[in-house]
Amino acid sequence: MYQYDEYDRRIVAERAKQFEGQVERRYSGEITESEFKPLRLQNGLYMQLHAYMLRVAIPYGTLSSKQLRKLAHIARTYDRNYGHFTTRQNLQYNWPKLDDVPKILQELASVEMHAIQTSGNCVRNVTSDHLAGVAPDELEDPRPWAEIIRQWSTFHPEFAALPRKFKIAVGATPGVDRAAIAYHDIGVRLIENEAGERGFEVLAGGGMGRTPYIGQVVGKFVAKEDLLSYIEAILRVYNTYGRRDNLYKARIKILVNALGVEAFRERVEEEWEQIKDGPLKLEQAEIERVARHFAPPPYEKLPDGKPQLDALRLGKDRELARFVRNNVLAHKQPGYAAVIVSLKQKGIPPGDMSDEQMDAFADLADRFGFGELRVTHTQNLVLPDVRASDVPALHAELVKLGLATPNHNKLTDLIACPGLDYCALANARSIPVALELMERFEDIDYQSDLGELNVKISGCINACGHHHVGHIGILGIDKGGEEFYQIMLGGSAGYDASLGEFLGKALSVTDIVPGVSKVLNCYLGLRTSPEDRFIDVVRRVGLAPFKEAVYGPPTMRQGVAHADH
Amino acid sequence: MQIIKDGAIVEDPFVHVADGVELPASGDVIVSLDRYLAQREALKRREGRVGVRLRSDQEAKLAAPYVAELPVIAVEFPGFKDGRGYTTGRLLRERFGYAGQLRAVGDVLRDQLFYMRRCGFDAFELKSGKDVQGALQAFQEFTVTYQGAADDQRPLFRRRASAHH
């Protein structure tokens, strides 16, 4: 994985020192709270409902065991013994004290980590495919490109005060998207053209929030050496023309859609023409220098692991069989597998991990791999390089840690925002609904039978829980001081990106989980085979049968609607 | 008034004159770009230098035809969250070859100075009431930068390469 050099170390150390000074000046009153706000935000320090929250950057979701131990230490020493992995592959601490933050930043710097630009109106931490470098279907490892973008964006002086936050994701698998690329301000997809040359398809204007949009293709084929100049041109157009009069209209998606993608592309390419042959043009030597950091680890020469894993999938140990079927994925390297470790455990908020689990998990990353792990944008972890023969031993260890739930891509592998339990913006709680769903649908055989199913829950229209792109999305709203929940169906964050549609009127906190249950039963009745996925059925038949399942026949709904007034 | 110029605190001879306000008979003034364009010939005959002031929604290209004759271009930052001026600065320096004084005015705070200088600003009117002396430290806080900008157009990867030769 990427190792800091002297430059990276200096920048992060100088940043930690700078922030210490900023905190001092805030305490002395030299800077006001409103002046301090963008400074702390660009250091990942966010004000929540009850306390500050510190968001630590995990660039493109790659983490070493040493770094995870440090994160455990910070959780233990400065917070309440846990951390929360986020939908942008970062880690949040929910209870740090402002006084401690400079110390925490120093601790992070000691393991080549930071909280730079994890919040605020700047280019945020760059995300990528959590299977980067190990996925058999990728063209090449996308992380060198993500790292090149990370360096370019870190303290970029021109883009330090954008109209709004700016998120970039990078992927490199044709026809597959494991990083929700289409929902980013800029999505970068490594592709191969008809001549067999590799370059980038560059999307812009995707995003969730109040006004969700799927990103549109701006750069159809951008040469590798032009990646930074092309992105810089997009950012420059956005910085100049993005709206600043209305917080809710300030994202680049609004600009792209107001101009239309053709006119937007014209502006970008007019700007790009001016800079594409300038100093931003990437040199082969630099591309190779960064790529060397992501060279494959010293794999052993092993026989193909597939027969072994297939045997486990059909084996007598049913718990292990379920785990291998659902959570053990194919790997580029013969004899190895990537293992999804679910942070969706019954009774625990999605994405949370205790300090003890982190420490123990770091040991597993060393024992079953090369001391590296990944964070997924669905708030899980990955051990990327597990020998197929080690899978049973790893599973046994995960069971001890309570981290062996075999629910990858299943109903209870759900995303939820922090909601009203933590967040000042929320209208309703998300976590209790998530926990109730996890409890109600705990039976893994039932989940496995349902097949691939993404449930995403947000506690308000800002959509941090990505409800628009859940196969089943749940949106919390406030109705006269009471929490209600709307169901959406048909969203997807994958390559077949689509936005969900509202099913009908909101359900009360006691009716929402039974409502989901009715949707699921309806699906089971409609599917033609177990391979006929939930999302396929919704796309094929539309919402009508699901409406009827949840709200009753149309005539009755009329009556209900009246009673609601 | 005192401004920061090239990393030091100096007395500034320029006076901002708002639109519609009569110009002083002599002395250095900064007027809006709109006024400059409307009264350019008359202003040239006046005793004293004339600089212009760009609003944050006025793009660099509007001032581009005049870069050779302007001793000062002041770019407004109406609020510290409005970052359009950073682009304006870079384009004036890097694309339009402006070599005169480039001044940040408005809601200019210490923690923006480093970025502003990188974008080509060499003069700063700090927001009134702020510690000017302390603000000078902002220029020393970072000793490494990844990207090229107006101060050095080479990204680190180009500088890194030359350091090894």
Image: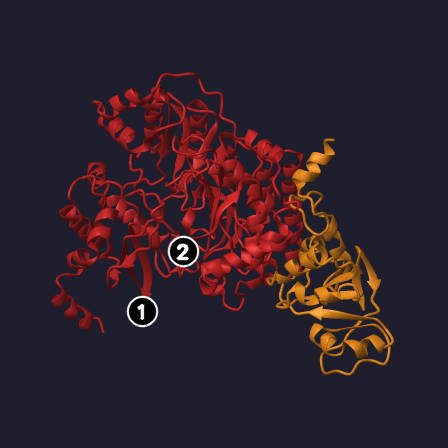
Chain colours: A red, B orange
Q: Nearer the viewer, residue A404 or A472?
A: A472
Whichever of labels 2 and 1 marks the residue nearer the N terminus, that label is 2
* Camera sees residue A493: yes
Q: CA distance from mark 2 to mark 1?
A: 26 Å
Near mark 2 (Cα within 10 A), the count class, few <14, some 14-19 or many ≥20, is: many
Provide residue A207's location: percent of width, then percent of height: 43, 55
Identify residue type, mark 2. Answer: Met
Residue corresponding to mark 1: A480
Q: Residue at x 31, y 69 (%)?
A: A480
Q: Secondary structure at mark 1?
A: loop
- Residue projecting furthest to the front: A195
Q: Residue at x 65, y 41 (%)?
A: A13
Query: Answer yes or no: do the residues labelled 2 and 1 have beta carbons within 8 Å?
Result: no
- The answer to whether residue A542 is left or right of residue A6 is left
Looking at the rendering, in which quadrant would you find the C terminus of chain A?
bottom left
The image's mark for residue A415 is none
Q: Secondary structure at mark 2?
A: loop
Provide residue A441's location: percent of width, then percent of height: 23, 44
Residue corresponding to mark 2: A208
Near mark 1 (Cα within 10 A), the count class, few <14, some 14-19 or many ≥20, is: few
Q: Residue at x 83, y 72 (%)?
A: B28
Provide residue A128's location: percent of width, then percent of height: 46, 41
A193 up-or-down from A463: above or below: above
Provide residue A59's location: percent of width, then percent of height: 51, 40
A463 up-or-down from B48: above or below: above
Q: Quadrant of residue B99?
A: bottom right
Identify residue type, mark 1. Answer: Gly
Chain at tag 1: A
* Camera sees residue A121: no
